[in-house]
Amino acid sequence: MFWGLAVWQRGTRRFKVAEVTVAAAAMLAASGAAAQPQDVARMFGPQNPFYAESKLPFQAPDFAHIHDTDYPPAIEAGMTQQRHEWSKIAHNSAPPTFDNTLVALERSGVLLNRVLAVFNGLAGANTNPVLQKMQELEAPRLAAHSDALYLDAKLFARVETLYNERASLKLNDEQARLLDQTYLAFVHAGAKLSEADKTKLKRLNEEEATLSSVFVNKLLAATKAAAYATSDKAALAGLSEAELHAAELAAKERKTAGYVVQLQNTTQQPDLALLSDRTTRAALFNDSWTRAERGGENDTRATVARLAEVRAEKAALLGKKSYAAWALETQMAKTPEAALKFMDDLVPAATAKAHAEAAEIQKLIDAQKGGFQLEAWDWNFYAEQVRKAKYDLDESQVKPYFEINRVLEDGVFYAATQLYGITFKERHDIPVYNPDVRVFEVFDVDGKPLALFYTDYYKRDNKNGGAWMDQFVGQSKLLGTLPVVFNVANFAKAAPGQPQLLSFDDVTTMFHEFGHALHGLFSNVEYPSLSGTNVPRDFVEFPSQFNEHWATQPQVFAHFARHYQTGEPMPQELAAKLKQSAGFNQGYGLTELLAAAELDMQWHTIPAGQPVADVDAFERAALEKTKLALKTVPPRYRSSYFMHVWGNGYAAGYYAYLWAEMLDDDAYQWFEDNGGLTRANGDRFRSMVLSRGNSEDLGPMYERWLGGKPSVAPMLKQRGLTGTER
């Protein structure tokens, strides 16, 4: 991410419709009108909370004083200011130097980054109609703003001069990396195109940004509207009292009677493992499967088809045969062929195991005289029964041992303290954007303040699905900033007065997202564009997936897996069953992930000039082509609700989760081979990997830490697909 110009699709503040004023509407209109941005910028002054850096600790956003109407003038003023900064660099009469060009670029855009970090950081977590409209209006303007940098011939000439002279500049390693990455970013973005082609590219970039923002907002509305609703309590047989209460509460929040089961972002829904009524399961699954394909204003298919077409046209203009070929040249995989081969090689083993799992489930259905063939909506319900029979394990037995605060403080934080020596203290004096949010100050080994960490774990209708990490402030020695990082999830909230108990999948999610957080918290680099998680997509998931392993590490597990009432540790027999069952259903899990990743790659290897007329037909053909069209194992995400690739920057990059899984399983094997959970191992990992951001070539960096090249064997072992060890 260079100078805060990435399209972040996350974040936004609680909003009341009554707060929309005529002035806000006027600012919105101005922000969307290309001829009048200066009108909005002139409205920006000291009264705006983004005018100067926050006086709160770590420059944390002062949510007590931020209002929706503050964003448009701050964004416009930020873009105006940064373009002026770029112009000064481009027209500097002095010959280009590292300081007057590269460092000057790194220092630019402080105001714009400040407001976008909050605006986009909140747009996924707590949105509202006004902020959604702002997103759609600002998206093309921000895309044009990015083009104003990368397609500026004078700016590129200065960068290219330095790049061509790099051998004689006597740069240190991080400076050399910054020059290399900046030059490649310019070239990748089209800096070498003719002026006529740059004009075409600008139009495509603006359209892509607009479509992406439209997709995000359509999907949020579609997901809310498609939630399963019923007035018949019997239809929800199998749900616990706490889960029924959550459904009842969701209905009340929507001012309807009965029960509402909200949808999560994936195809399969957690409640499908519990619901005993097959008709209800089929209805809930269908609500999920068709959420964005119901016609009307929230149907995303036309947006998806045009986005794919625009991206293919853009790639062709940039001299690439597909969008994937263009996107992956900056990733570890380098080419779509490499990513596809990596995935294709996993398909036979994954689908073979999924078929075996399906046969086992069908055998159970037949033994119960079900009289039907297994369907996708049956899988989780009967798989849970198979798991119970195999491991004598019931999800209701383990949940009482996973109370959310204990998991966070005695699990997630505890593991970080044992590995890295850092400590945490909750703060109640820092404003938050929603009452569900908590703030912790993070202290380094020597007791010095290291960062702020926010958590926002509970599902809301105005929050995007899934879980993620982002930051309100990034680390940079150059700018003198320390990290302000947040984690977001979508756990169902317990009834007032009831304990917040988690599934083990939720526990794993907390460890995963905190792995991302550690990547941001530990960043220790000079330049903001190389800081923290600003790394290729197929590396960014490595620290997060690696951190998941500590959830089951015996010392950590024993510390947090304690009964919420008695404080007693989970009985060894139950803990052993839970860990043994971790390898259960892995054929399904890997197959649904592969199906989504291959689907993403098929969309982004479409050549220019071949628009998709029927999104559903394309999806079916893509799954058939990749041998992943399993009736009972649907893709984790369908094309029409694949937020990662149409709205969250993972286009042609969803394979990154699997690529990173190879890296993280191999890394954890290294820890096990070298003493496991020790401060020495943690400090070495922090020093050589987590603190380095993108300040060095990531492949050699990983291999230097590991002591060799990564192997897929530990991943296959973890998945239970082979007994081979590294």
Image: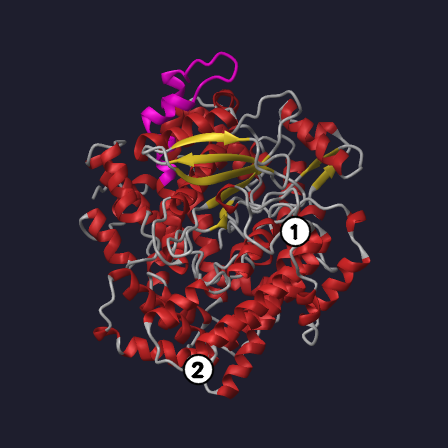
293 horizontally vs 370: left or right: right
- Marks 2 and 1: in contact by CB < 8 Å? no
Residue nearest the viewer, comparing 391 with 654: 654
Amino acid type, residue under disc 2 in the picture: Lys
Q: CA distance from mark 1 to mark 2?
A: 41 Å
The residue to which callout 1 is attached is 220
Residue at mark 2: 154
Dot 2 lies on which element?
Answer: helix
In this rendering, does residue 309 appear at all?
Answer: no
Most foreground residue, 204 or 333: 204
Q: Nearer the viewer, residue 128 or 328?
A: 128
Secondary-structure class at tag 1 = helix
Q: Tell me which colouring the rendered structure shows.
A: secondary structure
Q: Residues within 10 Å of mark 1 (few under 14, many from 20)?
A: many
Task: Identify the amino acid type marked 1.
Answer: Leu
Q: Residues within 10 Å of mark 2 (few under 14, many from 20)?
A: some
Give the percent coordinates (x, y) of residue 6: 50, 62
Instruction: Select label 1 or label 2 by which is in front.
Output: 2
